[in-house]
Image: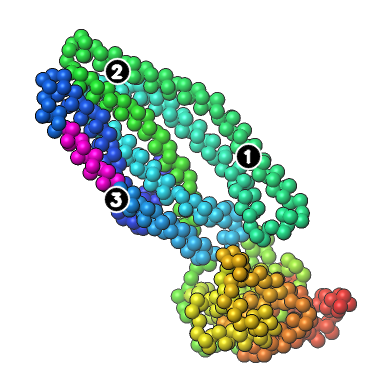
């Protein structure tokens, strides 16, 4: 990473923090200035004045004035520190939530295929995990850097006005020390880059081990052995990396300490010469210059460490910026959904092909025409491309070739959110959230009585007796995440929640991806009856392995290896005695 780009990363982060709290950065600079001045004033200037007053003519009045000034400065600083500490406690959550909001918002906006991109997904996880601590660590580093610069400035000005020659004694050893510290920074950066992949292994195991979804597998299989080995591999590799770099660091530390001791010895000898031989220094000057040199030397040594801290921050910031600067490939259109239909078809796919990252086609030359109010089924073996096809219809992905039209208009011209609002979906992998049944279905916190009644009618029709018989349970949380009184639903019950959610919204197109996979045969039969009634005026697109649930569809598309091999009503496909016939026969024989 170039210095220019590193500086750009820091400026980007500072601008972001300033946007969330414009007082924080000026406040840090002022606080660093006060801390550096307080240390220099008491250790250098005040001590010089007091010692000179005592040793020369015992100027008691001057000494008391300086003591009073010191007490006054300390009192002001203590009051400021208390006020600033109180402000920081209020500011930290604001800044952290600002960065977390950016991460969450970006995650909701990016193309869905980003979640299939390992590198981008890792950047998202890393950005989100670090967003709760990184901004505060960055601000701490900024404070330390400012304090170091101010301390060097105050001490340097004092030494320059007292005896400019001493600056040479300070600067020459520091140049050698800087060379050593530069080598140390380089070694630390190499170590950090080498450790990151190993930490990712450990973080993955820790994250996997506490997720509820994995609890059953961990207990009934030997996956915990594999995870433990992966974790221990990460630990052992990190230990080896620390061993590998420890000898290099030890040598560098010895050289650095040698420079420091040489530096201190030379300066002490020079000051003794000035006070004893030439008698041009007072006792106050001796102590003050010695303290100023010590302050300047220690802070000059820390400069490289402070800069290194920002280089380490830049590793994170660079990833965070890459995450934030991602530009969607599926771009938003400006047009709204037309009221009328410019085509005899509601949804039409013409010669559509699709591939992930320009690799081999997942879908090839797909042609589908769906009229409003039709029930369409898409069937086929696993991996045929059925779910990918649905995502293309909803414009979660853009087709690589061909066109998709809704009401006779290319879907790329529509506002994406407005277009998505035309669809209700029930996917095979759906989520129930840690909130009440009402909120899981209506996505509202304060529904009206009419809305609740509508929801209860839907639950009754899909035979959700758990909530129909005891209406008070609709207020209970659907997990035990935050409440012991929460309800843990079975797979079939969870699927009914997803069905109720889609039926409640009542948009023009209903997409069902394996809608009855977790239902028993009786519940499936009842659900199909309700679905025929509820979807009477809607366009329905069904993906299903249970061919008995799609036989009454207006058109059934049989897919295999990303292609549509057969299309037509059930009876027509059965008479054809092709792929669909064979699949249906196998299932019928099994029953």
Graded by Cα atoms within 10 Å as few (under 14), some (14 to 19) or many (20 or more), the crowding at tag 3 reads few
Q: Is residue 515 above or below residue 528?
A: above
Give residue 83's mark: 3
Give residue 235's mark: 1
Q: Tell me the SS state at disc 1.
A: helix
Q: Residue 21 placed where, x, y %?
A: 34, 56
Contact flag, marks 3 and 1 (Cβ < 8 Å): no
Residue 199 visible (yes or no): yes
Q: Residue at x 18, y 18 (%)?
A: 282
Residue 419 visible (yes or no): no
Graded by Cα atoms within 10 Å as few (under 14), some (14 to 19) or many (20 or more), the crowding at tag 1 reads some
Q: Is residue 479 above or below residue 252?
A: below
Mark 2 or 3, nearer chain start = 3
Q: CA distance from mark 1 to mark 2?
A: 46 Å
Mark 1 or 2, nearer chain start = 1
Magenta stretch, residue numbers: 66-81
């Amino acid at each position: 990473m170039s210095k220019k780009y590193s500086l750009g990363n820091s400026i980007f982060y500072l601008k972001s923090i300033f946007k969330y709290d414009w007082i924080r950065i000026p406040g840090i600079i002022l606080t660093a200035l006060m801390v550096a001045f307080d240390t220099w004033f008491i250790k250098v200037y005040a001590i010089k004045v007091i010692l000179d007053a005592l040793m020369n003519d015992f100027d008691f009045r001057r000494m008391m004035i300086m003591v009073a000034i010191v007490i006054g400065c300390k009192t002001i600083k203590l009051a400021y520190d208390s006020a600033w500490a109180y402000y920081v406690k209020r500011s930290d959550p604001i800044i952290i939530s600002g960065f977390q909001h950016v991460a969450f918002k970006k995650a909701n906006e990016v193309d869905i295929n980003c979640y299939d991109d390992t590198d981008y997904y890792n950047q998202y996880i890393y950005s989100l995990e670090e967003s709760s601590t990184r901004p505060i660590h960055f601000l701490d580093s900024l404070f330390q850097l400012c304090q170091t610069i101010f301390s060097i400035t105050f001490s340097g000005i004092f030494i320059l006005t007292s005896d400019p020659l001493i600056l040479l004694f300070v600067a020459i050893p520091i140049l050698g020390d800087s060379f050593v510290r530069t080598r140390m920074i380089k070694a630390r950066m190499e170590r950090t880059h080498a450790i990151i992949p190993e930490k990712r292994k450990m973080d993955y195991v820790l994250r996997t081990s506490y997720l509820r979804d994995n609890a059953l597998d961990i207990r009934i299989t030997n996956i915990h052995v594999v995870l433990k080995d992966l974790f221990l591999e990460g630990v052992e590799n990190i230990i080896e990396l620390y061993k590998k770099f420890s000898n290099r660091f030890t040598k560098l530390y010895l050289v650095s300490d040698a420079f420091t001791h040489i530096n201190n010895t030379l300066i002490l000898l020079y000051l003794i010469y000035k006070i004893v031989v030439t008698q041009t220094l007072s006792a106050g000057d001796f102590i003050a210059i010695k303290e100023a040199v010590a302050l300047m030397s220690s802070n000059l040594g820390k400069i490289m460490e402070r800069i290194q801290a920002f280089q380490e921050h830049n590793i994170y910031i660079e990833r965070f910026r890459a995450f934030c600067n991602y530009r969607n490939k599926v771009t938003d259109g400006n047009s709204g959904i037309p009221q009328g239909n410019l085509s005899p078809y509601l949804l039409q796919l013409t010669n559509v092909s699709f591939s992930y990252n320009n690799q081999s086609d997942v879908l090839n030359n797909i042609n589908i025409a769906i009229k409003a109010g039709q029930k369409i089924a898409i069937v086929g073996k696993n991996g045929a491309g059925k779910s990918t096809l649905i995502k293309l219809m909803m414009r979660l992905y853009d087709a690589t070739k061909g066109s998709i039209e809704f009401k006779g208009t290319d879907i790329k011209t529509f506002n994406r959110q407005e277009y998505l609002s035309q669809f209700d979906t029930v996917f095979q992998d759906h989520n129930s959230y840690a909130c009440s049944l009402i909120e899981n279905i209506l996505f509202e916190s304060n529904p009206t009585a009419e809305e609740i009644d509508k929801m209860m009618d839907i639950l009754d029709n899909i035979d959700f007796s758990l909530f129909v018989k005891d209406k008070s349970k609709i207020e209970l949380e659907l997990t035990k995440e935050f409440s012991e009184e929460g309800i843990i639903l079975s797979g079939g019950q969870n699927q009914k929640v997803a069905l109720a959610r889609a039926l409640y919204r009542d948009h023009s197109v209903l997409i069902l991806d394996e809608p009855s996979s977790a239902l028993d045969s009786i519940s499936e039969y009842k659900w199909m009856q309700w679905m025929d009634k509820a979807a009477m005026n809607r366009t329905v697109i069904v993906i299903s392995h249970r061919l008995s649930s799609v036989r009454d569809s207006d058109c059934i598309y049989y897919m295999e290896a990303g292609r549509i091999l057969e299309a037509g009503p059930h009876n027509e496909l059965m008479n054809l005695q092709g792929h669909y016939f064979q699949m249906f026969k196998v299932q019928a024989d099994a029953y």
